[in-house]
Image (tube, rainbow, N blue to C red):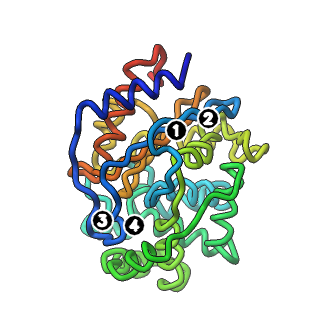
Amino acid sequence: MDYQELIEEVYHEVQAENLKGKVADYIPEIANVDPNQFGIALVDLKGNVYGVGDHQVPFSIQSISKVHTLTMVFNVFNSKLWSRVNVEPSGDPFNSIAQLEYEKGIPRNPFINAGALVITDALCSKFENPIDQLSEFINELAGETCVKINPDVRNSERKHGERNTALAYFLKSYKNFDNPIEEVLEVYFSQCAMEMSCVDLAKSFSFLANDGFSIFANRQILSESSARRINALMLTCGFYDEAGEFAYKVGLPGKSGVGGGVAAVMPHKFSIAVWSPELNEKGNSVKAIRALELLTDKLSFSLF
């Protein structure tokens, strides 16, 4: 399989379609990004990197970081974690408060905002310097120092974080929050404000395509069984309330972010990251979703 030829073909086909969406404007710093940028990076299990377009431009990874934080606490809390957060698709917007009240403070899954706040709370319980340790962990997964936290984006998140603050207090009222709310929110806003390129993001997801073993960190990050479970969560819950459609059209485990990035894996083959800032009405990158749909159509193998 000539991956370079494949992603270049996909890139040019998507560009020719001239798809349009809307850059996330509720975080002003992201609203200022050039909407025409578009990049794809694919990393195979030998560590070869293939890229096209703006694949080396750092961008705000936003909710994609939820996969990294979940990975950090996955083994630490084991079954206890799953009494605090479920593993079901939500079918509601990612920042829904109504669902959290209806289900008595147990978020549907780790990738909606309420669930991610529980995971970040667990991270704060376990790690002394969670922001630094998370950055170090992602750098290790990518095999290089690549993570930067954009202070302007973090401040933007903080200034427009009323709903996340409300979710945190809701969780606290149901005794599903152990640490000071402001402390956890600071970590949460920092992880969302992390910037990486498609290349580094694809490398950081490589272990999920490789039964939990990272070729860049040269160690087992998760057991094969745990890696499979995170992939299952990404497939069913990784794209907000568009997860079913993504599974139907693309069929890869993945995670999107409102910065316009998508990271995905084809188990035992490769990891891939695609970025383009314009989003559809569900909050997912229009070009990234289309690129991954074309990619799986062109491949002679599939998850299914």
Q: Which residue is mark 1?
A: 41
Q: Secondary structure at mark 1?
A: strand
Q: Amino acid at mark 4?
A: Ala
* Place of residue 219 in the rendered image (x, y in percent of width and height, measured from the top left): 78, 45
Q: Which residue is mark 2?
A: 49
Q: Which residue is mark 4?
A: 114
Q: Secondary structure at mark 3?
A: helix
Q: Amino acid at mark 2?
A: Val
Sequence-first tag of 4 and 1: 1
* Place of residue 136 in the rendered image (x, y in percent of width and height, measured from the top left): 69, 63
Sequence-first tag of 3 and 4: 3
Instruction: Give the quadrant of residue 33.
Output: bottom left
Q: Which residue is mark 3?
A: 31
Q: Residue at x 41, y 46 (%)?
A: 275
- In this rendering, the label closer to the viewer, 3 or 4: 3
Q: Nearer the viewer, residue 254 or 144?
A: 144
- In this rendering, the label closer to the viewer, 4 or 2: 2
Q: Amino acid at mark 1?
A: Ala
Question: Which labelled disc corresponds to residue 299?
Answer: none
Q: Amino acid at mark 3?
A: Ala
Q: Secondary structure at mark 4?
A: helix
Q: Are marks 1 and 2 in contact (CB under 8 Å)?
A: yes
Mark 3: give few (<14), some (14-19) or many (20+) Cα within 10 Å: some
